[in-house]
Image (spheres, rainbow, N blue to C red):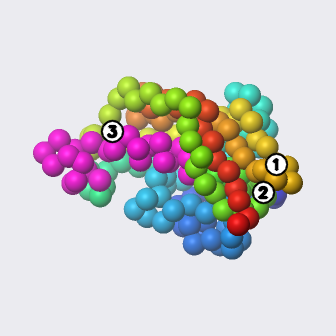
């Protein structure tokens, strides 16, 4: 396990987006506006519901976020795919946090349930990712995880069997 802290502020996340946190060619978060979190509050390689690692992050919701103007005019809603992308981003971040090398790629998700919406009056999203598998072999580096997104404490998105890989190519 690499020797990184268990929480990260916005500046740390921006360093990761620039490729400065885990080093060039390794796990990287997207830059704003596609960065879907403001801070990571906890990360581990052996915690979570299954003892295989977890990560928790928060995203502050403000009415001026870019997606509210275009999705949908007059009926602003955060696209559900952005919440899913936030979960994928965090899954890849956890693999880089472990010290595993390579660029992150989302490979898929087994099941997605959207049971609520993010409107401009929400205050904060909380992402929770729990790994069910974390695999590192000579040929494969991959995390498989379940996740939820909460809006002001209410579970609004649930995913099962999210897959993210790291590739050195």
Residue 134 shown left or right of residue 146 in the figure: right
Q: Which mark is residue 136?
A: 1
Residue 109: percent from left, percent from top: 55, 37
Looking at the rendering, the stretch of residues picked out in magenta corresponds to 67-89
Q: Secondary structure at mark 2?
A: loop
Prevailing secondary structure class for the magenta stretch in the rendered image:
helix
Vertical arrangement, residue 105 with respect to residue 154, above or below: below
For the point 38% across and 40% down, which residue is it? 80
Q: Nearer the viewer, mark 1 or mark 3?
A: 1
Give the spatial CA distance, label 1 vs label 2.
8 Å
Q: Nearer the viewer, mark 3 or mark 2?
A: 2
Q: Mark 1 packing: few (<14 Cα in 10 Å), some, or many (20+)?
A: some
Residue 145 shown left or right of residue 138 in the figure: left
Residue at which label 3 appears? 118
- Kindly check if marks 1 and 2 are in contact, taking CB atoms under 8 A apart as contact: yes
Residue 17: percent from left, percent from top: 56, 67
Q: Secondary structure at mark 1?
A: strand
Residue at which label 2 appears? 100
Residue 90 seen from this side: no
Foreground pick, 148 / 6: 148
* Quarter where residue 162 is shown: top right
Give the spatial CA distance, label 3 vs label 2.
33 Å
Foreground pick, 109 / 73: 109
């Amino acid at each position: 396990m690499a020797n990184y802290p268990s929480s990260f502020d916005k500046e740390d996340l921006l360093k990761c987006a620039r490729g400065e946190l885990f080093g060039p060619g390794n796990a990287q978060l997207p830059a704003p506006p596609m960065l879907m979190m403001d801070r990571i509050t906890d990360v581990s390689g052996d915690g979570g519901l299954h003892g295989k690692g977890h990560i928790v992050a928060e995203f502050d919701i403000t009415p001026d976020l870019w997606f509210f103007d275009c999705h949908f005019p007059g009926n602003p809603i955060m696209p559900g795919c952005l919440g899913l992308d936030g979960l994928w981003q965090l899954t890849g971040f956890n693999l880089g946090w472990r010290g595993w090398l390579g660029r992150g790629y989302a490979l898929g998700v087994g099941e997605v349930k959207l049971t609520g919406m993010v409107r401009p009056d929400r205050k904060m999203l909380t992402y929770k990712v729990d790994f069910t598998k974390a695999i590192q072999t000579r040929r494969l580096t991959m995390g498989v995880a379940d996740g939820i997104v909460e809006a002001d404490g209410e579970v609004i998105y649930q995913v099962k069997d999210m897959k993210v890989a790291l590739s050195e190519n």
